[in-house]
Amino acid sequence: MRPESESEIAAILRTARAPLTIIGGGTRSRPASGDVLSTRGLTGITLYEPAAMTLIARAGTPLAEIEAALAAENQRLAFEPPNRADAWAGGDPRDGEDVAPGARREASTIGGVIAANASGPRRIQSGAARDSLIGLRFVDGTGEVIANGGRVMKNVTGYDLVKLMAGSRGMLGVLTEVALRTAPVPPASVTLMLRCPAQRAVPAMTAALTGPWDISGAGWLPDLGVVLRLEGLPGSVALRARTLSARLEPFGAAGMLDEAAAAWRRLGALAAGWGPGAEDMAEDMAEGAVWRILCRPSQVDALLAANGGHEPLAMDWGGGLVILPLPAGALPALPPQARARRLSGAMMDLPLPDPVTARLNEGLRARFDPRGILAGAI
Amino acid sequence: MQMPVPDGAILARRDAIVAQLRAAVGAGTVIDDPVEARAYECDALSAYRCPPLAVALPTTTEEVAAILRLCHAEHVPVVPRGAGTSLAGGSMPTADAVVLGLARMNAVLDVSYGDRQITVQAGRTNLSVSGAVDEAGFFYAPDPSSQLACAIGGNIGMNSGGAHCLKYGVTTNNLLGVRMVLMDGTIVDLGGPMGEAPGLDLLGVVCGAEGQLGVVTEATLRILPKPAGARPVLIAFDSSETAGACVAAIIRAGVLPVAIEFMDRPCIVATENFARPGYPDCEALLIVEVEGTPPEIDEQLAVIRGIAAGFSPIEFRESRSEDESRRIWLGRKSAFGAMGQMGDYMCLDGTIPVSALPQVLRRIGELSAAAGLPVGNVFHAGDGNMHPLIIYDANRPGDLERVEALGADILRLCVQVGGCLTGEHGVGVEKRDLMPAQFSDADMEAQMRVKDVFDPRWLLNAAKVFPLHVSASRREGGRNAA
Ligand SMILES: Cc1cc2nc3c(=O)[nH]c(=O)nc-3n(C[C@H](O)[C@H](O)[C@H](O)COP(=O)(O)OP(=O)(O)OC[C@H]3O[C@@H](n4cnc5c(N)ncnc54)[C@H](O)[C@@H]3O)c2cc1C
Ligand SMILES: Cc1cc2nc3c(=O)[nH]c(=O)nc-3n(C[C@H](O)[C@H](O)[C@H](O)COP(=O)(O)OP(=O)(O)OC[C@H]3O[C@@H](n4cnc5c(N)ncnc54)[C@H](O)[C@@H]3O)c2cc1C
């Protein structure tokens, strides 16, 4: 099904008899259960006011289209959503292969990005997708159209269902329209690089993030080591790069990384489970699985040690996110309160952290989708 | 303003309920003396008052759980309270309600500078969170003007913001987790590393739910390294339109000021007469503050000066010393007090798209003239959060009603241009009956379903946020279940 309006989606959900799978760009390929409801017919930017830094778009609008519109005004999405196409900068060896019906794997939709709360390296500075989301419209499982938030930055009128829907992966409803806060592209950007193994990366990132450098990206890639990004006005960026390099001396000699934009895109994509390494492994599940683990940076040491010292595919958010490959069948051993989700293979979450949270999740699901029509969403 | 009729059955059982509370959590924790309880009869929206049934001041999460479990079993309404600085009547009780005050729970439980986070009890004041990490060179970013008094739990209830939220966001953008007690006494932890937990973002909806979903007892907050320094400039214009256009241009340029504050002529005149900050004679002025090391500040101010020049300002006054910075902020910081000198005032809190600013200011002027009530405007221009102040005489019969009508007209205007009814103060009882101006029945129904899940009996702060007739069947359903 490929409805082209919100009211069509409402009609479909009102009359549905069996669970539907909601698909945006389908960049997460997975076995679809039941009928597929594609949002790709619901496209278009409905409002873009660069001076007010707000953009509203229908949920099926390709991320690329939004990024192009923003770039024309020298703006961007602050949360730096991962884009699968970026993972294979040198060309995707799988080009031309069959993908899920009705979906081009490269084309993430803005609805899919919001439904997954997919957020890139700049999250440590600008927050996640949910923090840039200021309003939305959705159709719940009964076919009711619901609006929340608006198109202004500050809004505390009623409950914040905007946050509840971000990352809800279609469990409570089908997003039809999202309103986003946009951000100016700063005039200058510099990335410092510090070669070191994963085990030594976190202290260097922590040193950078606990000082007054206003870091807009702090990650680690096996081939580059620690990467630290500074953005802003040219003089300020140069000055901060100098003092930050001095601060990093105890950890090794930091250099400037050319072509840094590609490295940041690759980091964002890897963290979403895409790209060399992650996808090779996903293709061949016999070799193992890739896990996305959230923890406190101070727990990374213990995390790596407890999981057999496997080298991560990447780390982001100053160590708050670790992309870790593990042998087939192995569940990650987690420090207290750390969270893990399997990125490759079956999109399986570990059980919810406690029975009360599970009960609240289930209760909300039952209220917004009493007939289980959205049960096919993952 | 209407409140539900208190439940006579609860009033009749008052002594027994108080005795049970005392037995559960200790006598020193429960206040039932009517004189002492009077301190809890209202918050900062003092026009509306009602003494509560009793007040409980627990010191641990377990005590909070015991109190809630008991009230739940007895079907007694509960109103959570931080410092009572709400401007929307959010912590005003009803006569049949127990006020659950968190003020005694103000400890710092954990600080991790490496992880850039702090865990505190919910009654800790906003400013003292920054105070606890100040020496290590960190701060907690959301800074409501009430920060000396207001508590983190109240900030979470209202999703409060402050002058610096243009750059750092509001409470929800700086909250990583809470420990919370549901109305039935169940303790739950929400959030996690990076604020994320598997499943739905429950933390996101609890923040800003005005104490209706649970009582927060502990909060984990993001802390940030302090910037090297900050400096403001004052830019004066001969029209509000030009000032508004200049705001947009500054934001677009990629300099990210931490604050952009806007004052219009009535407000400037009032502050000049009151605090004598020495502001220029102008129609509108902006105060723009930037942060960083001295060379970084110079660089940003040079860009801002260049942008402002394009709008032919009457004056561009750059601070060169601590004292000049203080004087630039003086008028803005005393604006509310200054307007207060002109009479009683009602402070509105609507939000508008920045692009609608000139149109809204013009229309507010017209509405003000038609109502015969002066309105001064001071607001956080960077994010469109306006605080129109309506001046009136509380002792003149009929004035309050006229002010309320004008206030409602202005807030409806905000919604009409694409904005909303409240940007930081919350709905409470104050804007409850205006909710339909912004939300359809289905929109409100969706929000109330969330409360159904967290508080099925509708006992927590239930007479707030939703118009009484909209929530009536749910509130009565809860009561009849008794
Ligand atoms: C389970 C899962 C976890 C992920 N976690 C992360 C992560 O943590 N970080 C990260 O950067 N990226 C993550 N991703 C990647 C993320 O999928 C993509 O960045 C983004 O979702 C791509 O958009 P799409 O249009 O291709 O979405 P799709 O692959 O089509 O859909 C992604 C998810 O969103 C739902 N969905 C899509 N459109 C709508 C809509 N309009 N309304 C409601 N639901 C909708 C789908 O049912 C599905 O659950 C995750 C993806 C999934 C499925
Ligand atoms: C002079 C002045 C200036 C102000 N400036 C600002 C400003 O700049 N920005 C801004 O956003 N606000 C401002 N406010 C409004 C007010 O200070 C904020 O709303 C503040 O967050 C309220 O905190 P409190 O602890 O006083 O909460 P209270 O007034 O006690 O309660 C506020 C709400 O939160 C709920 N609540 C309180 N504690 C808890 C808890 N532990 N768990 C669950 N719910 C709870 C209450 O039930 C109520 O609904 C100002 C108020 C004044 C008087």
Image (cartoon, coloured by chain):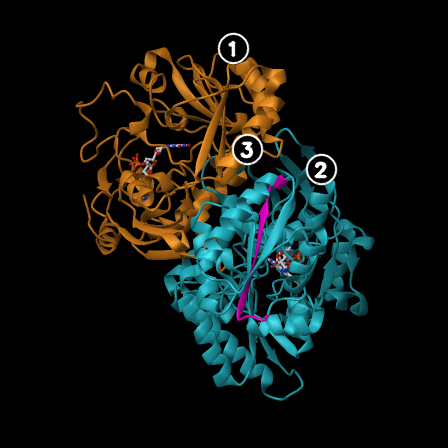
For residue B381, above or below residue A130:
below
Q: Is mark 1 within 8 Å of ligand 1?
A: no
Among the 4 quarters of the image, the one containing residue A51: bottom left
Q: Colour of chain B?
A: cyan
**Image quadrant containing the C terminus of chain B:** bottom right
Disc 1 to disc 2, C-alpha distance: 33 Å
Number of marks present in the image shown? 3
- Give the numbered dot on residue B432: none
Q: 10 Å neighbourhood of mark 3: few (<14), some, or many (≥20)?
A: many
Q: What residue span does the magenta drawing correspond to?
A: B281-294
Which residue is at the front of the view, B228 or B138? B228
For residue A340, above or below residue A46:
above
Q: Where does label 1 land, which residue?
A: A308
Q: 10 Å neighbourhood of mark 2: few (<14), some, or many (≥20)?
A: few
- Give the numbered dot on residue B193: 3
**B288 in magenta:** yes
Q: Colour of chain A?
A: orange
Which residue is at the front of the view, B468 or A285? A285
Q: Where does label 2 land, which residue?
A: B109
